[in-house]
Protein backbone atom coordinates (compact mmCIF):
# COMPACT_ATOMS: atom_id res chain seq x y z
CA UNK A 1 0.00 0.00 0.00
CA UNK A 2 1.02 3.56 -0.53
CA UNK A 3 3.06 5.16 2.24
CA UNK A 4 4.04 8.76 2.63
CA UNK A 5 7.11 9.91 4.48
CA UNK A 6 7.61 13.39 5.77
CA UNK A 7 10.40 14.41 8.08
CA UNK A 8 9.00 13.98 11.57
CA UNK A 9 11.58 16.27 13.12
CA UNK A 10 10.81 19.95 13.28
CA UNK A 11 12.61 22.12 10.77
CA UNK A 12 14.11 25.31 12.16
CA UNK A 13 14.84 28.04 9.63
CA UNK A 14 16.07 31.59 10.07
CA UNK A 15 13.68 34.28 8.91
CA UNK A 16 14.35 35.37 5.35
CA UNK A 17 15.86 32.05 4.28
CA UNK A 18 14.22 29.45 2.07
CA UNK A 19 12.55 26.56 3.85
CA UNK A 20 12.43 23.23 1.99
CA UNK A 21 10.22 20.37 3.10
CA UNK A 22 10.26 16.86 1.66
CA UNK A 23 7.52 14.39 0.88
CA UNK A 24 8.47 10.90 -0.28
CA UNK A 25 6.10 8.16 -1.31
CA UNK A 26 6.82 4.51 -1.73
CA UNK A 27 4.45 2.92 -4.16
CA UNK A 28 2.52 3.98 -7.22
CA UNK A 29 2.93 7.47 -8.59
CA UNK A 30 -0.12 9.56 -7.80
CA UNK A 31 -2.00 11.47 -10.42
CA UNK A 32 -1.61 14.54 -8.26
CA UNK A 33 -0.01 15.58 -5.01
CA UNK A 34 -1.17 18.29 -2.63
CA UNK A 35 0.32 20.39 0.14
CA UNK A 36 -1.62 21.75 3.09
CA UNK A 37 -0.80 23.93 6.05
CA UNK A 38 -2.12 23.13 9.52
CA UNK A 39 -1.94 25.41 12.53
CA UNK A 40 -2.34 23.97 16.06
CA UNK A 41 -5.93 23.12 16.89
CA UNK A 42 -7.15 23.99 13.39
CA UNK A 43 -8.11 22.12 10.25
CA UNK A 44 -5.64 21.97 7.37
CA UNK A 45 -5.69 24.66 4.70
CA UNK A 46 -5.11 23.78 1.04
CA UNK A 47 -2.03 25.42 -0.48
CA UNK A 48 -1.05 23.84 -3.78
CA UNK A 49 -1.83 20.90 -6.04
CA UNK A 50 0.62 19.58 -8.59
CA UNK A 51 -0.21 16.99 -11.22
CA UNK A 52 1.98 14.11 -12.32
CA UNK A 53 2.76 15.76 -15.63
CA UNK A 54 3.88 18.99 -13.95
CA UNK A 55 7.43 19.43 -12.74
CA UNK A 56 6.91 22.60 -10.78
CA UNK A 57 4.14 24.84 -9.50
CA UNK A 58 4.39 28.26 -7.91
CA UNK A 59 2.12 30.46 -5.85
CA UNK A 60 3.53 33.67 -4.46
CA UNK A 61 6.41 32.62 -2.15
CA UNK A 62 5.56 28.94 -2.45
CA UNK A 63 7.03 26.48 -4.91
CA UNK A 64 6.32 22.77 -5.25
CA UNK A 65 8.25 20.29 -7.36
CA UNK A 66 7.23 16.77 -8.26
CA UNK A 67 9.74 14.13 -9.33
CA UNK A 68 7.99 10.89 -10.24
CA UNK A 69 11.32 9.15 -10.79
CA UNK A 70 12.52 9.88 -7.28
CA UNK A 71 8.96 9.55 -5.93
CA UNK A 72 9.40 12.82 -4.18
CA UNK A 73 7.91 16.26 -3.86
CA UNK A 74 9.70 19.27 -2.45
CA UNK A 75 7.87 22.22 -0.94
CA UNK A 76 9.75 25.51 -0.77
CA UNK A 77 8.90 28.72 1.03
CA UNK A 78 11.15 31.59 -0.03
CA UNK A 79 11.80 34.67 2.10
CA UNK A 80 10.34 32.80 5.05
CA UNK A 81 8.57 34.69 7.82
CA UNK A 82 7.68 33.73 11.40
CA UNK A 83 4.03 33.64 10.27
CA UNK A 84 4.95 30.71 8.04
CA UNK A 85 5.54 28.61 11.15
CA UNK A 86 3.08 25.70 11.05
CA UNK A 87 2.86 22.02 10.23
CA UNK A 88 2.86 21.25 6.52
CA UNK A 89 1.10 18.15 5.27
CA UNK A 90 1.60 16.31 2.02
CA UNK A 91 -1.32 14.34 0.55
CA UNK A 92 -1.66 12.00 -2.41
CA UNK A 93 -4.71 10.88 -4.34
CA UNK A 94 -6.09 7.39 -4.28
CA UNK A 95 -8.27 5.57 -6.75
CA UNK A 96 -11.32 6.11 -4.62
CA UNK A 97 -13.78 8.90 -4.58
CA UNK A 98 -11.52 11.93 -4.11
CA UNK A 99 -9.96 10.36 -1.02
CA UNK A 100 -6.43 11.37 -0.07
CA UNK A 101 -3.61 9.62 1.75
CA UNK A 102 -1.90 11.91 4.23
CA UNK A 103 1.61 12.27 5.51
CA UNK A 104 2.12 12.98 9.20
CA UNK A 105 3.40 16.44 8.44
CA UNK A 106 6.56 18.38 9.16
CA UNK A 107 6.57 21.15 11.70
CA UNK A 108 8.28 24.27 10.39
CA UNK A 109 9.58 26.90 12.78
CA UNK A 110 10.78 30.21 11.37
CA UNK A 111 12.97 32.05 13.85
CA UNK A 112 13.09 35.86 13.80
CA UNK B 1 -14.53 31.08 -1.32
CA UNK B 2 -14.55 27.40 -0.34
CA UNK B 3 -15.38 27.88 3.32
CA UNK B 4 -16.34 24.98 5.55
CA UNK B 5 -17.75 25.49 8.99
CA UNK B 6 -17.87 22.97 11.79
CA UNK B 7 -19.90 23.12 14.96
CA UNK B 8 -19.26 22.93 17.83
CA UNK B 9 -15.59 23.84 17.98
CA UNK B 10 -15.25 22.02 21.27
CA UNK B 11 -17.50 19.88 23.43
CA UNK B 12 -17.21 18.11 26.75
CA UNK B 13 -19.62 15.29 27.42
CA UNK B 14 -20.11 12.55 29.94
CA UNK B 15 -19.37 8.94 29.19
CA UNK B 16 -22.37 7.17 27.68
CA UNK B 17 -23.91 10.23 26.06
CA UNK B 18 -24.05 11.03 22.36
CA UNK B 19 -22.57 14.04 20.61
CA UNK B 20 -23.44 15.44 17.19
CA UNK B 21 -20.95 17.42 15.13
CA UNK B 22 -22.09 19.42 12.09
CA UNK B 23 -20.07 20.19 9.01
CA UNK B 24 -21.32 22.72 6.46
CA UNK B 25 -19.93 23.94 3.17
CA UNK B 26 -20.92 27.60 3.16
CA UNK B 27 -20.30 28.76 -0.38
CA UNK B 28 -20.14 25.64 -2.51
CA UNK B 29 -21.91 22.35 -2.93
CA UNK B 30 -19.92 19.43 -1.62
CA UNK B 31 -20.29 16.29 -3.65
CA UNK B 32 -18.24 14.43 -1.10
CA UNK B 33 -17.47 15.06 2.56
CA UNK B 34 -14.87 13.36 4.67
CA UNK B 35 -14.57 12.85 8.40
CA UNK B 36 -11.16 12.58 10.00
CA UNK B 37 -9.82 11.99 13.43
CA UNK B 38 -6.47 13.35 14.51
CA UNK B 39 -4.40 12.54 17.56
CA UNK B 40 -1.68 14.91 18.76
CA UNK B 41 1.33 15.04 16.46
CA UNK B 42 -0.17 12.39 14.20
CA UNK B 43 -1.48 12.30 10.70
CA UNK B 44 -5.09 12.72 9.75
CA UNK B 45 -6.92 9.41 10.02
CA UNK B 46 -9.80 9.07 7.61
CA UNK B 47 -12.87 7.68 9.33
CA UNK B 48 -15.44 7.76 6.56
CA UNK B 49 -16.41 9.22 3.24
CA UNK B 50 -19.92 10.39 2.61
CA UNK B 51 -21.78 11.37 -0.52
CA UNK B 52 -25.01 13.28 -0.41
CA UNK B 53 -28.02 11.00 -0.29
CA UNK B 54 -26.15 7.75 0.14
CA UNK B 55 -24.70 5.77 2.99
CA UNK B 56 -21.26 6.65 4.22
CA UNK B 57 -18.31 4.43 3.44
CA UNK B 58 -16.37 3.67 6.58
CA UNK B 59 -12.69 2.87 6.78
CA UNK B 60 -11.57 -0.43 8.18
CA UNK B 61 -11.67 -0.47 11.96
CA UNK B 62 -14.19 2.37 12.28
CA UNK B 63 -17.43 1.26 13.90
CA UNK B 64 -20.30 2.55 11.81
CA UNK B 65 -22.81 2.00 14.61
CA UNK B 66 -20.75 4.15 16.90
CA UNK B 67 -19.90 6.93 14.47
CA UNK B 68 -23.12 7.71 12.63
CA UNK B 69 -22.75 9.87 9.56
CA UNK B 70 -25.59 11.57 7.75
CA UNK B 71 -25.02 13.57 4.58
CA UNK B 72 -28.46 15.05 4.25
CA UNK B 73 -27.73 17.69 1.64
CA UNK B 74 -24.97 18.96 -0.60
CA UNK B 75 -23.96 21.42 2.10
CA UNK B 76 -24.40 19.50 5.35
CA UNK B 77 -22.95 16.37 6.88
CA UNK B 78 -23.21 15.32 10.51
CA UNK B 79 -21.17 12.94 12.63
CA UNK B 80 -22.79 11.56 15.76
CA UNK B 81 -20.58 9.84 18.29
CA UNK B 82 -22.94 7.51 20.11
CA UNK B 83 -22.40 6.26 23.65
CA UNK B 84 -19.15 8.15 23.87
CA UNK B 85 -16.31 6.85 25.99
CA UNK B 86 -13.10 8.55 27.11
CA UNK B 87 -11.15 6.80 24.35
CA UNK B 88 -13.31 8.66 21.82
CA UNK B 89 -11.78 11.92 23.00
CA UNK B 90 -10.00 13.37 20.02
CA UNK B 91 -9.90 16.14 17.44
CA UNK B 92 -12.49 15.51 14.73
CA UNK B 93 -12.19 17.37 11.44
CA UNK B 94 -14.45 17.35 8.41
CA UNK B 95 -13.55 18.29 4.89
CA UNK B 96 -15.53 18.82 1.74
CA UNK B 97 -14.69 18.36 -1.88
CA UNK B 98 -16.56 20.19 -4.62
CA UNK B 99 -15.89 17.22 -6.86
CA UNK B 100 -16.22 17.90 -10.56
CA UNK B 101 -12.54 16.99 -11.01
CA UNK B 102 -11.55 19.39 -8.24
CA UNK B 103 -9.33 17.31 -6.04
CA UNK B 104 -8.40 19.58 -3.19
CA UNK B 105 -10.26 19.35 0.08
CA UNK B 106 -11.52 22.24 2.17
CA UNK B 107 -11.47 21.65 5.87
CA UNK B 108 -13.57 22.79 8.76
CA UNK B 109 -11.82 24.20 11.82
CA UNK B 110 -12.23 20.95 13.75
CA UNK B 111 -14.06 19.87 16.90
CA UNK B 112 -12.24 18.98 20.08
CA UNK B 113 -14.24 16.28 21.87
CA UNK B 114 -13.50 15.45 25.48
CA UNK B 115 -15.39 12.60 27.11
CA UNK B 116 -15.24 12.50 30.89
Image (cartoon, helix red, strand yellow):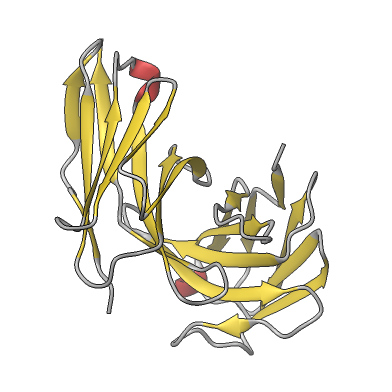
Nearer to me, A3 or B17: A3
The quarter of the picture where residue B78 lies is bottom right
Q: Is residue A77 left or right of residue B112?
A: left
Q: Give residue B54's quadrant in the image.
A: bottom right
Q: Pinpoint residue B39: horizontal percent, then vertical percent.
A: 39, 60
Q: In the rendering, at what x and y percent does residue B12 appear?
A: 62, 58
Residue B116 in view: no
In this view, the residue farthest toward the right is B73
Taking the spot 70% from the left edge, 47% from the top edge, the residue there is B4
Viewed as shown, does residue B75 lie left or right of A111? right
Picture quarter containing residue B63? bottom right
Seen in the image, is B15 located left or right of residue B75? left
In the picture shown, does residue B46 fall above or below B64? above
Q: How many marks?
A: 0
Residue B94 position, x and y percent, is 61, 59
* Residue at figure coordinates x 29%, y 13% from the top left: A79
A21 versus A19 height, above or below: below
Residues B14 and B7: in front is B7
Residue A5 against residue A75 in the figure, above or below: below
The residue shown at (57%, 74%) is A97
Q: Taking the image as drawn, is residue A8 in sight?
A: yes
Spot occupied by residue A66 in the image (x, y as percentages of width and height): 28, 47
Amino acid sequence: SQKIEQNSEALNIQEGKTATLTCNYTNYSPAYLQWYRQDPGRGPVFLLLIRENEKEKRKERLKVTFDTTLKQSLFHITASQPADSATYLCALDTDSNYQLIWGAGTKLIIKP
Amino acid sequence: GAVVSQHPSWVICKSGTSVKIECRSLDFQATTMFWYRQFPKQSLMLMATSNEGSKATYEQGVEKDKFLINHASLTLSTLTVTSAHPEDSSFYICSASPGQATYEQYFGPGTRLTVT
